[in-house]
Amino acid sequence: MPGAGIDWATPWFAPWRSRGEPIAALHVQGMPLHEAFSRQSSRPLQFVAQHELPPGESYEAFIFRTKRCPTRDNLHDFFNALVWLAFPLAKQRMNDLHGEQLDAGATQLRGPVRDAMTVFDENGALLHAPPQIWEALVARDWQRLFLDLRSLWADCRLVVFGHALLEKLVAPRKDITAHVWLANAPSTAGLDDEWLAAQLCAETLAGKPFTPLPLSGVPGWHTGNGAVSFYDDPLVFRPAGRQKKTTTVRPGASRP
């Protein structure tokens, strides 16, 4: 059952606990997720049952048209709705951009802007960190990032944004990697939503402004990551220049 197996004490779920744990408890008691989330939402957007999405209409287009978010009773949609509650401005901005791209005729292929939004919506994270951390991260100098600069992580704030990434972290693995937005996030959580919404524009997104961060290297996020040998895994800690091939997502191929 969605929410029943979430360890809210972990560093990746702790920022979401105050909103997510009470809703998960309502669902465990038998309340459908769309109803539990709608009770918590003070925004115009409402959460509705999946069957309200008409056949043939895309998920993004339906939200853009109706300001209603179809929500299934599963972990993926639980986290998606949870991010909507915490980041209403950023999520609405993403949906508006999807709508603008659709109005402009981006129907056969998502294109670079919608591709980038999908990547960040599913797998993104925000980071506030000192300059040295950012330099090592962008250079993919993993041992410097996670070992030499280890003490500086006490001054960092890392927030998982992507709902698919949150879903993966229910059963964490060493190879889970986030796409971190390439700009220093605010130092306090209360400013995240407004800040991210202001960052989201078609021109910026077309350049895919992300850099990979293997979450298992973050101090406190995986046992054993204080050892040098932990980073001798090129499938997880990829050197600069070695990236996975990206593909263009076709509408309807999979739902976000």
Image (tube, rainbow, N blue to C red):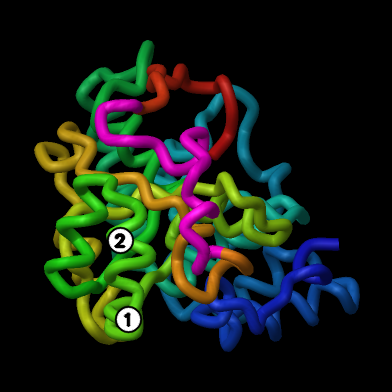
Name the outermost residue toward the top.
108
Which residue lies at the image location 60% right of the left edge and 61% below the top edge?
A: 79
Residue 47: image x %, image y %? 59, 61
Which residue lies at the image location 30% right of the left edge and 61% below the top edge?
A: 145
Task: Give the quadrant of residue 31.
Answer: bottom right
Query: For the magenta stretch, what is the residue range?
Result: 225-242
Q: Amino acid at mark 2?
A: Leu
Residue 69: image x %, image y %? 54, 53
> Is residue 147 within the magenta segment?
no
The residue at which mark 2 appears reads as 145
Query: In this view of the protein, can residue 12 be seen by the observer?
Result: yes
Q: Amino acid at mark 1?
A: Ser
61 lies left or right of 163: left
Q: Nearer the viewer, residue 256 or 221?
A: 221
- Tell me if mark 1 has few (under 14), some (14-19) or many (20+) residues whose alpha carbon lies within 10 angstroms of its own: few
Residue 138: image x %, image y %? 21, 49
- Tell me if mark 2 has few (under 14), some (14-19) or many (20+) residues whose alpha carbon lies within 10 angstroms of its own: many
The residue at which mark 1 appears reads as 151
The Cα atoms of the two marked residues, 2 and 1, are separated by: 10 Å
Which residue lies at the image location 25% right of the left edge and 26% below the top edge?
A: 112
Q: Nearer the viewer, residue 159 or 64?
A: 159
Report the quarter where the N terminus lies: bottom right
Residue 147's place in the image compared with 173, above or below, is below
Q: Nearer the viewer, residue 153 or 126?
A: 153
Residue 49: image x %, image y %? 70, 53
Which residue lies at the image location 64% right of the left edge and 27% below the top edge?
A: 55
Report the quarter where the C terminus lies: top right
